[in-house]
Image: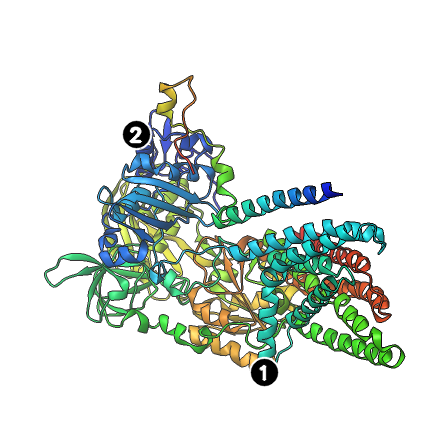
């Protein structure tokens, strides 16, 4: 590759290299007009602190947002769906701004009222990348608010999904309150029980002791009836479905502890075990909270709706353009799609030059050229100017969206496999009940008065909460650690499923190839600097994606005068530059010969003054270290490739993956789904790694579906986990880390059995003192928490080393 | 001993006060976003223009929660 050794000027606004043209105002340089405009707006409104907080905080403005893009936000129906509060003077709306990335963004977005005076208040939620706008209605409108955001470079992302309802996602506040109440009651009950612990049953002041017991009883009521309610509900549901889950024995233990304590306190025979009960409930709730903390910024359940735009330009019979909601599109409607917009419904090309990028939908790596009269499928992205289309199918019936009608999208993933902790808890329950039974029989023979005491003590002390604690804290900590290595898992069962997989299936485009760049190499004579500039200047003229990538591949040194530029559709381009006649395009076009073989579209030939100088080969650029990862994974798992692209890369992939690897190309989304289903029917546990909408079915069907994303803010289809592209190299280590989960849970379980044996030793004899229970409970809980988090952090060292 | 009754009662009341404060903070969505406020509080409360006008006098917060 040719290196450009030149001191680079960075754009004051966005920090990008100013390559082609530098626009200067005073002492500040900008890479494009867009950036300059944004700077001017910010400067005019005295908001230049934006540039002080972080250097070059702006968003590159090379892609100019076309005028009228937000016209659909004037539509009453759409407004009603988007705003979540509305009265005569005010409207509240939440916009999703994926561009948000630094504290400068927060600052400027919260000063939006300086740019648009109709905005009363704007508040940012940085983690969710959302801004909540409150604006004065007649003074400004939803459309104007969106335009103000776009004006400073934060174009709101409005998708079809946003019209699903005025729901505002909220964190589960109920769970936090339950946790707070349990903690409060636990602490106070513990404190009030202290005199009892230290007096060891000797009553110095019976009145005070009684009073404390009643107070404990009152404090335990909210724990029992409110905080512990989820264990009862889930345990009861489990019983009704004739399925013994882990909550059933827990609920039973809590119930028995509570009733026995109430009995002891009211009959004044003892102090009860309310301290242990509230403590256990508190610890278990912490564990559940820790395990279920979700990532607010990441959505795992997106379908095509969040990919599709909300509004589209419709052309009426009298050639007037109006913006309508995509959901209202009917068969026969004429629509206009601008550059870089997504086609919302299957249609026929009516007017214009279509160059459709289907990479996200089908996995084809190169844009496809369509001529008038041809059908274009929904989900493709137009890449060369505006086109007009005639809709042939409604959005819900189009080729792409039909995938979501598959039954697999209607059921939840936790269908067949129950988490193994439930199975373990079942054995635990059997053992526990048989010990209780034997003890009961023993005492009924020897001393019947002790039966009740001994049996309830057993059930109190051997609560399976240790099991629940070990699994929730292990999972919680593992999720946290995986998160650190940019593997964001949806929930804890994903980790468990990951340990069982035996087959790994890769998608090609965007998964094992980089999403953003494609590699280019030049074959032919050595290019002089002048020749390079001639070709670059020609490539720079065209909007064809291949031309564009060649232009960005070649270094820039000076602008040349281009004359007589001609573009021959489907063949190539030619122009006279500095008295040289430069031609670029397909083999036939450049050399006038047809004997140049190989796949068209991926090779670009170039000639100067009719002298052939060589060709550019555009290759998929594979992820770094692919070879290493593949050979490491290949020794443990069966690998397969399932691609929607054509098989042109097959020979190369064979060299990486080996000849034995099964590779399927030209796969439609349904094919992918069915292929995985058939593997599963043969007993395989499949890990699918994909990225696009075309993998959505396969990701859903597989045992574990990981979506690769080079930018987690980007759209990623429904999946179980999202892996950042940069950490693809440690995929094997991440999988191995997940495999450790069971081992950690088992070892902490072994530890808890030790405590259980100690507790049972007292319980079977019928003299479990509250103080023993009160010591065993927190000690065992804390040591389990320490062991699980310690072990999972210890195994992390291996990941750290690799990273 | 009667001092105990009063002290325990007082400590419980105090603790209940904190519990209520906690529940209020959860209900008023203070746990919704635990990152942005930490950045927001570091911003200057003024825009450049205002700063020039009132160099010495601290300016009332332009943005309140």
**Element on which disc 2 rests:** helix
Q: Give residue A571's position: percent from left, percent from top.
A: 29, 60
Neighbours of disc 1 within 10 Å: few (<14), some (14-19), many (20+): few
Residue at 35% in and 24% down? B49
- In the rendered structure, find residue A551 and report the number of the disc placed on it: none
Q: Earlier in the sequence, mark 2 or mark 1?
A: 2
Number of numbered discs present? 2
- Residue A502 visible in this rendered orientation of the protein: yes
Residue A337: quarter of image: bottom left
The answer to whether A273 appears left or right of A702 in the picture is right
Which residue corresponds to mark 2?
A44
Above or below, A46 against A75 in this view is above
Q: Which marked residue is nearer to the observer: mark 2 or mark 1?
A: 2
Q: Give residue A90's position: percent from left, percent from top.
A: 28, 46
User: Disc 2 sits on a residue from what chain?
Assistant: A
Marks 2 and 1, how far apart in space? 67 Å
Above or below, A514 against A407 in this view is above
- In the rendered structure, find residue A682 and report the number of the disc placed on it: 1
Residue A255: quarter of image: bottom right
**Camera-side residue of B15 and A262:** A262
**Camera-side residue of A712 and A753:** A753
User: Disc 1 sits on a residue from what chain?
Assistant: A
**Camera-side residue of B13 and A673:** B13
Q: Give residue A322's position: percent from left, percent from top.
A: 18, 57
Neighbours of disc 2 within 10 Å: few (<14), some (14-19), many (20+): few
Residue at 38% in and 30% down? A48
């Amino acid at each position: 590759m040719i290196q450009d050794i030149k001191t680079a000027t960075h754009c004051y606004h966005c920090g990008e290299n100013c390559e082609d043209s530098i626009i200067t105002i005073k002492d500040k340089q900008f890479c494009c007009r867009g950036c300059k405009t944004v700077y001017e707006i910010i400067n005019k409104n005295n908001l230049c602190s934006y540039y002080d907080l972080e250097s070059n905080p702006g968003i590159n403005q090379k892609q100019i947002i076309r005028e009228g893009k937000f016209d659909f936000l004037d539509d009453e129906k759409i407004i009603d769906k988007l705003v979540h509060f509305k009265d005569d003077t005010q409207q509240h709306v939440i916009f999703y701004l994926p561009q948000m990335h630094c504290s400068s963004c927060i600052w400027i977005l919260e000063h939006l009222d300086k740019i648009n005076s109709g905005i009363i208040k704007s508040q940012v939620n940085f983690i969710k990348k959302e801004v909540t706008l409150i604006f004065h209605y007649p003074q400004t409108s939803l459309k104007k608010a969106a335009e103000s955001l776009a004006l400073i470079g934060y174009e709101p992302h409005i998708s079809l999904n946003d019209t699903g309802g005025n729901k505002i996602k909220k964190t589960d506040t109920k769970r936090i309150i339950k946790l707070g109440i349990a903690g409060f009651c636990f602490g106070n009950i513990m404190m009030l029980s202290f005199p009892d612990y230290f007096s060891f049953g000797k009553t110095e002041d019976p009145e005070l002791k009684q009073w404390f017991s009643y107070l404990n009883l009152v404090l335990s009521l909210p724990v029992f009836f409110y905080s512990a309610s989820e264990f009862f509900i889930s345990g009861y549901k489990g019983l009704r479905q004739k399925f013994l889950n882990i909550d059933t024995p827990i609920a039973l233990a809590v119930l028995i502890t509570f009733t026995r304590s109430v009995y002891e306190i009211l009959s004044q025979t003892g102090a009860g075990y309310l301290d242990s009960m509230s403590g256990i409930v508190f610890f278990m709730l912490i564990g559940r909270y820790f395990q279920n903390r979700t990532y607010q910024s990441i959505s795992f359940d997106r379908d095509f709706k969040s990919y599709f735009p909300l509004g589209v330009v419709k052309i009426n019979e009298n050639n007037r353009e109006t913006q309508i909601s995509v959901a209202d599109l009917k068969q026969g409607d004429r629509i206009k799609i601008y550059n870089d917009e997504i086609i919302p419904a299957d249609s026929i090309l009516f007017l214009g030059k279509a160059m459709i990028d289907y990479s996200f939908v089908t996995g084809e790596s190169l844009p496809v050229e369509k001529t008038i009269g041809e059908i274009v499928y929904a989900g493709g992205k137009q890449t060369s100017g505006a086109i007009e289309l005639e809709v042939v199918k409604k959005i819900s019936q189009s080729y792409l969206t039909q995938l979501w009608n598959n039954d697999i999208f209607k059921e939840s993933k936790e269908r067949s496999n129950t988490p193994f902790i439930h199975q373990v808890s079942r054995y635990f329950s059997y053992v526990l009940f048989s010990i209780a039974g034997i003890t009961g029989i023993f005492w009924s023979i020897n001393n019947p008065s002790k039966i009740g005491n001994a049996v309830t003590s057993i059930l109190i002390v051997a609560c399976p909460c240790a099991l629940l604690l070990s699994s929730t804290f292990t999972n919680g900590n593992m999720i946290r650690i995986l998160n650190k290595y940019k593997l964001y898992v949806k929930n804890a069962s994903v980790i468990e499923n990951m340990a069982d997989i035996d087959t790994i299936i890769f998608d090609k485009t965007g998964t094992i190839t980089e999403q953003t760049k494609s590699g280019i190499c030049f074959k032919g004579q050595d290019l002089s600097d002048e020749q390079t500039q001639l070709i670059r200047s020609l490539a720079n003229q065209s909007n064809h994606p291949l031309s564009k990538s060649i232009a960005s591949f070649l270094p820039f040194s000076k602008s040349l005068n281009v004359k007589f530029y001609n573009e021959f559709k489907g063949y190539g381009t030619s122009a006279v530059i500095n008295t040289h006649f430069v031609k670029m395009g397909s083999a036939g076009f450049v050399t006038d010969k047809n004997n140049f073989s190989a796949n068209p579209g991926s090779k670009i030939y170039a000639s100067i003054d009719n002298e052939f100088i060589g060709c550019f080969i555009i290759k998929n650029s594979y992820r770094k270290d692919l070879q290493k990862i593949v050979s490491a994974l290949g020794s443990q798992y069966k690998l397969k490739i399932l691609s929607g692209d054509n098989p042109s890369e097959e020979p190369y992939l064979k060299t990486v993956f080996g000849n034995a690897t099964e590779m399927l190309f030209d796969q439609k989304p349904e094919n992918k789904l069915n292929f995985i289903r058939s593997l599963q029917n043969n007993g395989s546990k499949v890990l699918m790694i994909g990225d696009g909408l075309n993998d959505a079915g396969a990701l859903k069907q597989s045992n574990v579906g990981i979506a690769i994303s080079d930018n987690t803010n980007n759209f990623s289809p429904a999946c179980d986990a999202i892996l950042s592209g940069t950490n693809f190299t440690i995929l094997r280590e991440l999988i191995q880390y997940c495999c450790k989960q069971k081992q950690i849970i088992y070892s902490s379980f072994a530890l808890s059995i030790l405590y259980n044996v100690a507790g049972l030793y007292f319980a079977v004899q019928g003299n479990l003192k509250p103080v023993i229970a009160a010591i065993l409970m927190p000690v065992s809980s804390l040591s389990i928490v320490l062991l699980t988090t310690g072990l999972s952090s210890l195994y992390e060292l291996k990941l750290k080393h690799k990273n | 001993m009667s001092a105990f009754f009063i002290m325990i009662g007082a400590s419980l009341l105090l603790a209940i006060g904190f519990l209520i404060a906690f529940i209020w903070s959860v209900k008023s969505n203070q746990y919704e976003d635990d990152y942005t406020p930490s950045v927001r509080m570091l911003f200057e409360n003024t825009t450049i223009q205002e700063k020039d006008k009132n160099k010495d006098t601290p300016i009332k917060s332009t943005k309140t929660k």
